[in-house]
Image (cartoon, helix red, strand yellow):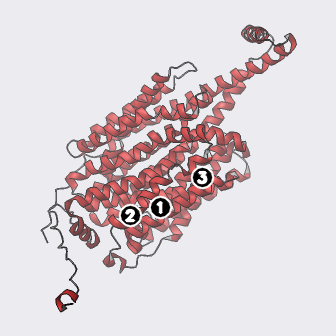
Amino acid sequence: MSSASSTPKPKAFRAPLPLPDDIPATANQPIRDRFAQFGSAYRWLLLFSMLVGSMSTLLAATTINVALPAIIGAFGLGQDQAQWMSTAFLAGSTIAMLANAWALANYGPRATYVCGMLVFMAGSLLGAVSGSLEMLIVSRAMQGMAAGLLQPMSMFLIFQTFPDHKRGTAIGIFSIGVVLAPAFGPALGGIAVDLVSWRLVFVATVPLAMLALVAAPILMPSVDHAQKAEKRPLDWQGLLLLSMTSISLLSGFAGGNRDGWDSDITLIKFTVGAIAGVLFFLWERRHPFPALNPAIFKYRQFWSAGLIIAATGIAIYGSTYMVPLFVQLVQHYSPTEAGVMMIPGGIAMVIGFPLAGRLTDKVDTRWLLGFGILSFASAAWLLSHVSLLTPYWILVSWIVLSRVGISFCMPPANTTAVRAVPPPLLASATGGVSFLMQIGGAFGVNLLAILLQRRLIFHGEHLAAAINESNPQLAYDHTLIARELEMNGMAQLPAFQSAFGEVGRQISTEATMFAFRDCFFVISIWFAIVFCLLIFMPKPQLQPAQATPKR
């Protein structure tokens, strides 16, 4: 054998691709290295990877809603307890997302993403085998913590890889994943409940999570060593105070109906929550690396857009919580029918989000926000007139109108808020935007569930007061039901007795309908108030496009 043939061939060297001209000036070295590896297509590959991961975690936020009646029946829960299925997810997400900046600085997007997906999958498996309400709440909190770690990171990477004049479009496309979850999540959950049981709902999104977990090591940038050298500490004191604030207030509201609003335990919860909230604000002002930097709220453009973002959180999570419950408890649709009802609204958002994102780059976003707010307020007002006989497709059309409103609120508000802050506060601003969305959703679902239960009690007592022998309508309805039961073969005395039970069920259904009406009416009034507050928002300023030289 010749020496030439025995000499090992040198490995092929792949020259780095030329860097695009429009890489943002704030992009760090690991991101530039990825651009050198994948070229200008990298930003879109990364966007797709983040889209899959967001869909897997945010689907879990809404698939549970159509399973709530089954969970309520399995564990014997009230509305004030059942709402923790949604609230625990949102509360866990709210707290975890404020640790996102610390995780990115110390471990980088790649490690943070992989850790978040593993926590999500563990929480999903725990929920599927849970045998108590407490275990279900823990599993939902774990899923929420994973979503909280990943969602702000996605926004941060968009601003690191897309130039300013393309960010609205990128956010609009990315938001498809955010809106597909409320749209298709209930349908997926409904199918899972009807085919197997509510336990399948917890693991239905695990396949998407596994796909995102495979793509993360390939596309996610590693840790920025220059940023890691700063050794940014975790603001664990701030996170602890925020956890105490959120959990105490949410628990205080949720337990008020059972424990009494003037009971010692309720007053203690509210007092602890208020004190912890004040201490959190004071601590964040003096901490060098705060979990939620108060400096971002100094910018009028940020806090005014932040109000819209919090209202949008209430809209998305509140309506996605209420509508499937209404059609199952009042109109007696199956879980699958309740979930499929949300799909046309999701398609409307898939069309509306990219459109709103592109318009955000070109027109005054206050016009887009005003249109979106009025659209959702109108849909909520229409839903406040819903009845037992409202046709299926009429309900679908109202939901579509509400989703059009959300489409013209989220991308403009997110982009406007983040554009308001200087580059050093970019990570804090993206975390703050996600925080406002989640905290709005958490308290929105919590308060709507409490309002629903209180109004259910009010209308039930009001209608029950009219049940007496002197009520001719009651006697007439009882007679009709009794005769129908006799015609179906039931003896006269059992039919007479069973008719009272059927009248009671009808009254309960009617009271539930009135309670849902009240909740939708309150939502419409809230958005009318938010529309009036648009006058405080300044005209948003578009940052000039920045070009970076080729390397």
Report the amino acid beneath label 2: Ala
- SS assignment at label 3: helix
Q: Residues within 10 Å of mark 3 (few under 14, many from 20)?
A: many
Q: Residues within 10 Å of mark 1 (few under 14, many from 20)?
A: many
The picture places residue 454, in percent across and down from the top left corner, at 65, 35
108 left or right of 546 in image: right
The picture places residue 278, in percent across and down from the top left corner, at 53, 60
Sequence-wise, the earlier of marks 3 and 1 is: 1
* Rendered view: 227 above or below 171: below
Residues marked 2 and 3 touching at CB (< 8 Å): no
Is residue 356 visible in the rendered image? The answer is yes
Q: Which mark lies nearer to you, 2 or 3?
A: 2
- SS assignment at label 2: helix
What is the spatial separation of the Cα atoms under label 2 and label 3, in whole angstroms?
A: 36 Å
At 30% from the left edge and 45% from the top edge, which residue is drawn?
412
Q: Quadrant of the N terminus?
A: bottom left
Residue farthest to the bottom? Answer: 3
Residue farthest to the right? Answer: 493
What is the spatial separation of the Cα atoms under label 3 and label 1, in whole angstroms?
A: 29 Å
Mark identifier at residue 216: 2
54 left or right of 145 in image: left
Mark identifier at residue 117: 1
**Residue 4 is drawn in which quadrant?**
bottom left
Report the amino acid beneath label 3: Leu
At 74% from the left edge and 19% from the top edge, which residue is drawn?
502
Camera-side residue of 417 and 81: 81
Mark identifier at residue 249: 3
Q: Residues within 10 Å of mark 2 (few under 14, many from 20)?
A: many
Report the amino acid beneath label 1: Met
The picture places residue 361, in percent across and down from the top left corner, at 22, 46
121 left or right of 268 in image: left
